[in-house]
């Protein structure tokens, strides 16, 4: 009886001690299926940053990061299954989810209000979720698809000599027929009304390996420009079809999820000239990459091949992981240097202030733009750069483009208001809701 009593007394103490130093971060990934060429480097970059924080810093202010991958195959139903399985893990539950899919983000958004776990969607997801007074747990950090599409249109307008020169032009929008591809359409429709260009909407069925009919239409319609909003094999297939039909690649502009090495590399030199917008992730290496190569790959602890360190998708995932970690770090300033709940991490993500000095300290100089969030602003930045494929690598234009928020903000307001009405959500009073 004495021994049993001693065991009973000790049992709760051992796990409590271990848990006191661990913060659980789930990793939704897709290393298999049609989207694996894009999913693998994304997962590797995300995981490598979590490993780096443990190896270099001893965790987040002494709190070790623990993580678990869950394979979604980029399928919404599997993404929801992963969420349900992982949301309660760790001493305080999941800190935040990075769905890496607009479809999964759509499916999880309603759940966040009950589960109180933030969704960090770096540059993807619901464009309306920039409105933090409605979407309390969504953080579309780094810019929305409306921001990306607006900047692409501005770049095309500048190339023509002004937005007024778009009148009478024909622009084809080749998009992944999913919530992801459809998300940019409202912005493009609005711009077409403003400037008088014809918008051809050409959906491509998942996964996008069959596009003969789409490019036959492009050959027949002869658009002045093609906007590509694909993912995975759809992008490389589109570039190859453009080559086959003789459509000039320098007249093609991709969103930031159609502007990575796997999208153009399969076409070889023929992909030269293709443009894409980029926010968090131009290609290249900096201080954070040096640390990863030394502390992880130098000790055979890197997640993937070291050659991909510094590529677009890898860098973008580094940014996603970094913002998640910084949200936790910021929340620790309020709630203490301990494992935090999703609700506490939400506060940290809502109070980010990543300026140039902070970017340099994090080792991300040249790989992201300053970002600052608030109760009402869950996007934090509406600027981006353009880049172009030179046949072997991406070359980023140093010009910083600013999305026209005079166009986008009313669209966000209208969409958020509609969502709030449908879901019976009360707008937050930011003056009162500081927690």
Image (cartoon, rainbow, N blue to C red):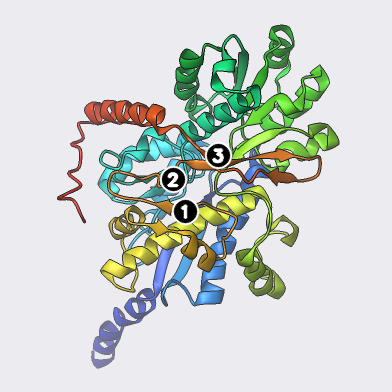
Q: Earlier in the sequence, mark 3 or mark 1?
A: 3
Can residue 201 be seen in the rendering of this structure?
Answer: no
Q: Indicate which disc residue 115 carries.
A: none
Is the C-beta separation of discs 1 and 2 under 8 Å?
yes
For label 2, count other residues whose C-alpha is less than 10 Å away and answer few (under 14), some (14-19) or many (20+). Answer: many
| Count of picture labels | 3
Query: Circle 2 sits in a helix, a strand or a loop, which is it?
Result: loop
Residues at marks 3 and 1 touching, judged by CB atoms closer than 8 Å: no
- Spatial CA distance of label 3 from label 1 is 30 Å
Q: Is residue 271 left or right of residue 318?
A: right
Compared to 302, does 415 lie above or below? above
The x, y position of residue 278, in whole percent, is 59, 42
- Of residues 32 and 372, the one nearer the viewer is 372
Residue at the spot of label 2 = 381
Q: Position of residue 261 (x, y in %)?
A: 72, 43
Q: Quadrant of residue 219?
A: top right
Q: For marks 1 and 2, give the CA distance.
A: 7 Å
**Label annotation for residue 74:** 3
């Amino acid at each position: 009886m004495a021994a049993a009593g001693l065991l009973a007394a000790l049992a709760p103490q051992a796990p409590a001690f271990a848990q006191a130093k661990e913060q659980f971060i789930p990793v939704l990934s897709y290393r298999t299926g049609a989207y694996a060429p894009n999913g693998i480097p994304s997962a590797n970059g995300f995981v490598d940053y979590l490993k780096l924080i443990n190896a270099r810093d001893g965790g987040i202010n002494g709190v070790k990061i623990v993580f678990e991958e869950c394979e979604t195959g980029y399928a919404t139903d599997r993404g929801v299954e992963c969420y349900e399985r992982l949301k309660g893990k760790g001493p305080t539950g999941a800190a935040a989810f990075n769905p890496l899919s607009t479809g999964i983000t759509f499916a999880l958004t309603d759940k966040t209000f009950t589960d109180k776990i933030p969704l960090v969607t770096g540059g993807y997801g619901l464009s309306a979720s920039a409105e933090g007074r409605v979407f309390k747990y969504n953080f579309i950090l780094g810019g929305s698809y409306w921001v990306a599409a607006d900047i692409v249109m501005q770049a095309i307008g500048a190339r023509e000599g002004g937005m007024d020169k778009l009148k009478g032009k024909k622009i084809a929008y080749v998009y992944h027929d999913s919530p992801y591809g459809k998300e940019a359409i409202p912005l493009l429709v609005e711009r077409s009304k403003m400037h008088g260009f014809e918008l051809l909407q050409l959906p491509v069925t998942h996964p996008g390996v069959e596009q003969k009919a789409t490019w036959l239409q492009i050959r027949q319609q002869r658009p002045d420009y093609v906007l590509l909003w694909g993912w995975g094999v759809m992008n490389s297939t589109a570039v190859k079809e453009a080559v086959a039909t003789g459509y000039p690649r320098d007249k093609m502009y991709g969103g930031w999820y159609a502007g990575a090495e796997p999208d153009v590399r399969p076409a070889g030199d023929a992909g030269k000239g293709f443009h894409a917008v980029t926010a968090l992730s131009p290609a290249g290496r900096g201080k954070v990459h040096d640390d990863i190569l030394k502390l992880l790959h130098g000790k055979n602890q890197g997640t993937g091949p070291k050659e991909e360190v510094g590529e677009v998708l890898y860098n973008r995932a580094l940014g996603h992981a970094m913002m998640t970690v910084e949200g936790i770090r910021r929340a620790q300033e309020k709630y203490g240097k301990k494992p935090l709940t999703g609700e506490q991490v939400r506060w940290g993500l809502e109070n980010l202030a990543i300026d140039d000095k902070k970017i340099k300290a994090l080792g991300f100089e040249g790989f992201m733009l300053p970002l600052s969030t608030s109760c009402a602003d869950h996007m934090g930045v509406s600027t981006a750069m353009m880049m172009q494929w030179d046949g072997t690598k991406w070359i980023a234009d140093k010009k910083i483009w600013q999305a026209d928020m005079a166009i986008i903000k009313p669209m966000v307001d209208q969409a958020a208001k509609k969502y709030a009405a449908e879901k019976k959500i009360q707008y937050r009073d930011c003056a009162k809701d500081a927690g």
